[in-house]
Amino acid sequence: MKHRKLAMVLTAAALGLAACSPGTGEARSSQAASVHPASGLRVVPLTVTHGAKKLKFRVEVAASPQEQARGLMFRSAMGADEGMIFPMNPPRGASFWMRNTMIPLDIIFVGVDGRISNIAANAIPYDERPLSSVGEVIAVLELNGGRAAQLGISPGDKVEW
Protein backbone atom coordinates (compact mmCIF):
# COMPACT_ATOMS: atom_id res chain seq x y z
CA MET A 1 0.00 0.00 0.00
CA LYS A 2 2.83 2.41 0.87
CA HIS A 3 4.47 1.70 -2.49
CA ARG A 4 1.25 2.48 -4.37
CA LYS A 5 0.89 5.84 -2.58
CA LEU A 6 4.57 6.64 -3.18
CA ALA A 7 4.18 5.77 -6.87
CA MET A 8 1.13 8.04 -7.14
CA VAL A 9 2.96 10.93 -5.45
CA LEU A 10 6.02 10.50 -7.69
CA THR A 11 3.84 10.32 -10.82
CA ALA A 12 2.00 13.50 -9.83
CA ALA A 13 5.31 15.26 -9.12
CA ALA A 14 6.74 14.18 -12.48
CA LEU A 15 3.65 15.42 -14.32
CA GLY A 16 3.86 18.73 -12.46
CA LEU A 17 7.52 19.15 -13.39
CA ALA A 18 6.81 18.28 -17.01
CA ALA A 19 4.11 20.94 -17.14
CA CYS A 20 6.56 23.53 -15.77
CA SER A 21 9.52 22.49 -17.90
CA PRO A 22 10.89 25.01 -20.36
CA GLY A 23 9.63 24.78 -23.89
CA THR A 24 8.59 27.13 -26.60
CA GLY A 25 5.69 29.40 -25.84
CA GLU A 26 4.42 28.59 -29.32
CA ALA A 27 4.03 24.91 -28.51
CA ARG A 28 2.11 25.70 -25.34
CA SER A 29 -0.06 28.29 -27.13
CA SER A 30 -1.04 25.93 -29.91
CA GLN A 31 -1.96 23.25 -27.39
CA ALA A 32 -4.01 25.71 -25.34
CA ALA A 33 -5.74 26.97 -28.48
CA SER A 34 -6.93 23.47 -29.45
CA VAL A 35 -9.97 23.91 -27.17
CA HIS A 36 -11.98 27.13 -27.02
CA PRO A 37 -12.09 28.61 -23.50
CA ALA A 38 -15.74 29.72 -23.70
CA SER A 39 -17.32 26.66 -25.35
CA GLY A 40 -14.89 23.85 -24.62
CA LEU A 41 -15.18 22.88 -28.30
CA ARG A 42 -12.22 21.74 -30.38
CA VAL A 43 -10.64 24.56 -32.40
CA VAL A 44 -9.23 23.88 -35.88
CA PRO A 45 -7.71 25.99 -38.65
CA LEU A 46 -10.01 26.85 -41.56
CA THR A 47 -9.10 28.50 -44.86
CA VAL A 48 -11.34 30.31 -47.31
CA THR A 49 -9.72 30.66 -50.72
CA HIS A 50 -10.94 33.79 -52.50
CA GLY A 51 -9.17 34.15 -55.83
CA ALA A 52 -5.44 34.19 -55.04
CA LYS A 53 -6.06 35.08 -51.37
CA LYS A 54 -6.10 32.48 -48.61
CA LEU A 55 -8.04 33.80 -45.63
CA LYS A 56 -7.21 31.98 -42.41
CA PHE A 57 -9.49 31.47 -39.42
CA ARG A 58 -9.54 29.47 -36.19
CA VAL A 59 -12.96 27.89 -35.79
CA GLU A 60 -14.75 25.95 -33.10
CA VAL A 61 -16.17 22.64 -34.33
CA ALA A 62 -19.81 22.07 -33.34
CA ALA A 63 -19.92 18.37 -34.19
CA SER A 64 -22.63 16.77 -32.03
CA PRO A 65 -26.35 17.55 -32.29
CA GLN A 66 -26.18 19.22 -28.85
CA GLU A 67 -23.19 21.39 -29.85
CA GLN A 68 -24.92 22.34 -33.08
CA ALA A 69 -28.15 23.22 -31.29
CA ARG A 70 -26.27 25.58 -28.94
CA GLY A 71 -23.92 27.07 -31.54
CA LEU A 72 -22.94 30.60 -30.61
CA MET A 73 -25.96 31.23 -28.37
CA PHE A 74 -25.34 33.44 -25.35
CA ARG A 75 -21.90 34.58 -26.58
CA SER A 76 -21.28 38.33 -26.38
CA ALA A 77 -18.16 38.49 -28.56
CA MET A 78 -16.02 36.57 -31.03
CA GLY A 79 -12.56 37.39 -32.38
CA ALA A 80 -12.20 38.84 -35.89
CA ASP A 81 -10.58 35.68 -37.27
CA GLU A 82 -12.62 33.22 -35.24
CA GLY A 83 -15.79 31.38 -36.14
CA MET A 84 -17.74 28.18 -35.72
CA ILE A 85 -18.12 25.33 -38.22
CA PHE A 86 -21.10 22.97 -38.22
CA PRO A 87 -20.18 19.84 -40.23
CA MET A 88 -23.16 18.15 -41.90
CA ASN A 89 -22.66 14.43 -42.36
CA PRO A 90 -24.47 13.30 -44.43
CA PRO A 91 -24.86 16.46 -46.53
CA ARG A 92 -28.32 18.03 -46.27
CA GLY A 93 -30.25 21.21 -46.61
CA ALA A 94 -29.62 23.44 -43.61
CA SER A 95 -31.64 26.15 -41.95
CA PHE A 96 -30.31 28.34 -39.11
CA TRP A 97 -31.83 30.99 -36.87
CA MET A 98 -30.50 33.47 -34.35
CA ARG A 99 -32.43 32.43 -31.23
CA ASN A 100 -30.49 33.50 -28.12
CA THR A 101 -27.60 34.67 -30.31
CA MET A 102 -26.36 38.03 -29.09
CA ILE A 103 -23.94 38.97 -31.90
CA PRO A 104 -24.70 39.51 -35.61
CA LEU A 105 -23.34 36.70 -37.77
CA ASP A 106 -22.55 35.89 -41.37
CA ILE A 107 -23.95 32.40 -41.91
CA ILE A 108 -21.99 30.81 -44.75
CA PHE A 109 -23.33 27.65 -46.37
CA VAL A 110 -20.69 25.29 -47.82
CA GLY A 111 -21.98 23.12 -50.66
CA VAL A 112 -21.09 19.50 -51.34
CA ASP A 113 -18.26 20.64 -53.62
CA GLY A 114 -16.58 22.47 -50.71
CA ARG A 115 -17.46 25.86 -52.17
CA ILE A 116 -19.70 28.52 -50.66
CA SER A 117 -23.20 28.16 -52.07
CA ASN A 118 -24.77 31.18 -50.34
CA ILE A 119 -24.29 33.59 -47.45
CA ALA A 120 -26.91 34.95 -45.04
CA ALA A 121 -25.05 38.17 -44.25
CA ASN A 122 -25.42 40.11 -41.00
CA ALA A 123 -28.03 37.83 -39.46
CA ILE A 124 -29.91 39.85 -36.84
CA PRO A 125 -29.37 38.90 -33.17
CA TYR A 126 -32.34 37.06 -31.61
CA ASP A 127 -34.20 36.84 -34.96
CA GLU A 128 -36.03 33.53 -35.26
CA ARG A 129 -36.68 33.65 -38.99
CA PRO A 130 -35.00 30.68 -40.72
CA LEU A 131 -31.96 31.38 -42.89
CA SER A 132 -31.56 28.51 -45.34
CA SER A 133 -28.97 26.98 -47.62
CA VAL A 134 -29.35 26.83 -51.36
CA GLY A 135 -29.17 23.06 -51.85
CA GLU A 136 -27.40 20.48 -49.74
CA VAL A 137 -24.36 21.49 -47.67
CA ILE A 138 -21.45 19.70 -46.05
CA ALA A 139 -21.02 22.47 -43.48
CA VAL A 140 -22.19 25.82 -42.24
CA LEU A 141 -19.61 28.40 -41.18
CA GLU A 142 -20.48 31.28 -38.86
CA LEU A 143 -18.31 34.41 -38.78
CA ASN A 144 -18.88 37.82 -37.23
CA GLY A 145 -21.56 39.76 -39.07
CA GLY A 146 -20.11 41.77 -41.97
CA ARG A 147 -16.78 39.90 -41.92
CA ALA A 148 -17.47 38.07 -45.21
CA ALA A 149 -18.12 41.34 -47.06
CA GLN A 150 -15.14 43.01 -45.38
CA LEU A 151 -12.83 40.24 -46.65
CA GLY A 152 -14.54 39.80 -50.02
CA ILE A 153 -15.76 36.27 -49.24
CA SER A 154 -18.44 35.27 -51.73
CA PRO A 155 -20.28 32.30 -53.24
CA GLY A 156 -17.90 30.06 -55.16
CA ASP A 157 -15.01 30.52 -52.71
CA LYS A 158 -13.41 27.28 -51.47
CA VAL A 159 -13.65 26.37 -47.76
CA GLU A 160 -11.22 23.86 -46.20
CA TRP A 161 -10.79 22.73 -42.60
Image (cartoon, rainbow, N blue to C red):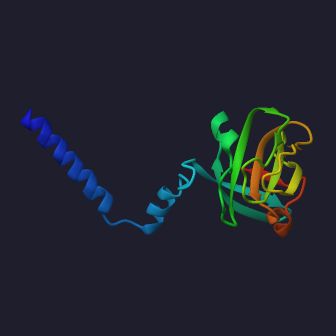
- Residue sitting at 75 percent across and 63 percent down? 55
Res 64 visible: no
- Foreground pick, 120 / 3: 120
In the displayed structure, would residue 7 be above or below residue 106? above
User: If the image is split into quadrants, where does the N terminus sit?
Assistant: top left
User: Is residue 21 shown left or right of residue 82?
Assistant: left
- Residue sitting at 82 percent across and 62 percent down? 148
Residue 133 percent location from the top left of the image:
88, 42
**Residue 80 lies in quadrant:** bottom right
Res 46 visible: yes
Name the outermost residue toward the top: 90
- Foreground pick, 143 / 154: 143
Residue 49 percent location from the top left of the image:
80, 59
User: Is residue 18 shown left or right of residue 102?
Assistant: left
In the displayed structure, would residue 139 be above or below residue 54? above
Residue 111 percent location from the top left of the image:
85, 42
- Residue sitting at 33 percent across and 66 percent down? 22
Total labels drawn: 0
Residue 78 percent location from the top left of the image:
66, 62
**Residue 154 lies in quadrant:** bottom right
In the displayed structure, would residue 78 be above or below residue 137? below
User: Is residue 114 shown left or right of residue 74?
Assistant: right
Name the outermost residue toward the left: 2
- Residue sitting at 80 percent across and 33 percent down? 91
